[in-house]
Amino acid sequence: MLTDEELQAYRRVGKLVAEVREHVRPLVRPGEALLTIAEAVEDAIRQRGAKPAFPCNVSVNETAAHYSPPADDDAQVEEGDLVKVDIGAHLDGYIADTAFTTATGAKAELVQTVERALEEAIKAVKPGVDAGEIGRVVEEVATAAGFKPIRNLTGHALARWDLHAGLTVPNVREVTGQRLKVGDVVALEPFITDGAGFVEDMPQVYIFRYLHDRPVRMRMTRELLNDIKRTYSALPFAERWLAKRMSRLRLELTLRELVGVGALYPYHVLRERAGGAVAQAEHTVIVTEQGCEVTTR
């Protein structure tokens, strides 16, 4: 169970993230740079007194997740693109997570379907329900519209300073043995595609997370790891947030070394296996006796 103080913290950060989402939504339009969108989200979070819980993801078309534009990115939204914007903020470690997708033309049906799947998933939340029952609801909405849920992307529980706090919520029918209880804070996150229904790692990595202290040879590398640990704790951070510290090449080599020794976790860009378009919708909910409270409306 959450204390009153914890409950109010989750409500405050949820309201803040909802405001940021609606603030940035008009920016997602043809001709706008992906980097501009991501930085607008992160700046809006900071201006409201919070901090990003992870780098803003701006993932386009078959790119499903984990694309947070690097500092030198010149990609723009093109006419007809399907654009996913994934936003997270925290207040003293209490996290809210939300996402939306924009599209026009033929891809608009994907967006409508994933939003419907999210609403049906919210209705399915109640104490004692197996997390896989929520996946069943998402899968049924997707397949009824002629699409597929992405089997290897899931929703997730949230805890203070922890973006993925153990419990996972599949987007397909499963018996997980994980049952929701009153006070659980959960990010419901359907992903739907007109492709194969799976994502695969791409070589690119623009987001990382601190894992462990590890011995490294270079003083500069040790100092960077200490700064990452102190600044971001165990929450994900963007490569571009560190771009002013050193040259791009030096930063890439340093981060690669820290991944190699197990000090950092890399979030590879995720792409739909068959190149299908991917739509995403997400809200954070708190499980209640009656069902759930959506904090990010």
Image (cartoon, helix red, strand yellow):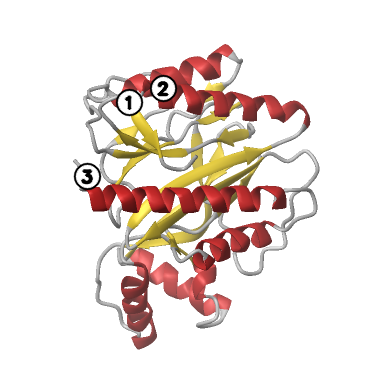
Residue at disc 1, secondary structure: loop
* Amino acid type at image mark 3: Leu
Residue 240 in view in this figure: yes
Q: Are marks 2 and 3 in contact (CB under 8 Å)?
A: no
Foreground pick, 187 / 166: 187
Q: Are marks 1 and 3 in contact (CB under 8 Å)?
A: no
Foreground pick, 166 / 254: 166
* Amino acid type at image mark 2: Lys
The span from disc 1 to disc 2 (Cα, nearest Å) is: 7 Å
Residue 209 in percent (x, y) is at 37, 61
Residue 167 in percent (x, y) is at 27, 37
Label 2 vs 3, first from the N-terminus: 3
Is the N terminus in the top left, top right, bottom left or bottom right quadrant?
top left
Left/right of residue 286 with respect to residue 79 in the rendered view = left
* Amino acid type at image mark 1: Gly
Label 1 vs 2, first from the N-terminus: 2
Marks counted in the figure total 3
- Give me the residue at 67% from left, 63% from top: 73
Q: Which residue is mark 3?
A: 2
- Give me the residue at 31% from left, 82% from top: 217
Q: Are marks 1 and 2 in contact (CB under 8 Å)?
A: yes
Residue 212 in percent (x, y) is at 25, 66
Q: Which residue is mark 2?
A: 123
Q: Which residue is mark 1?
A: 291
Above/below status of 37 relative to 64: below
Residue at disc 3, secondary structure: loop
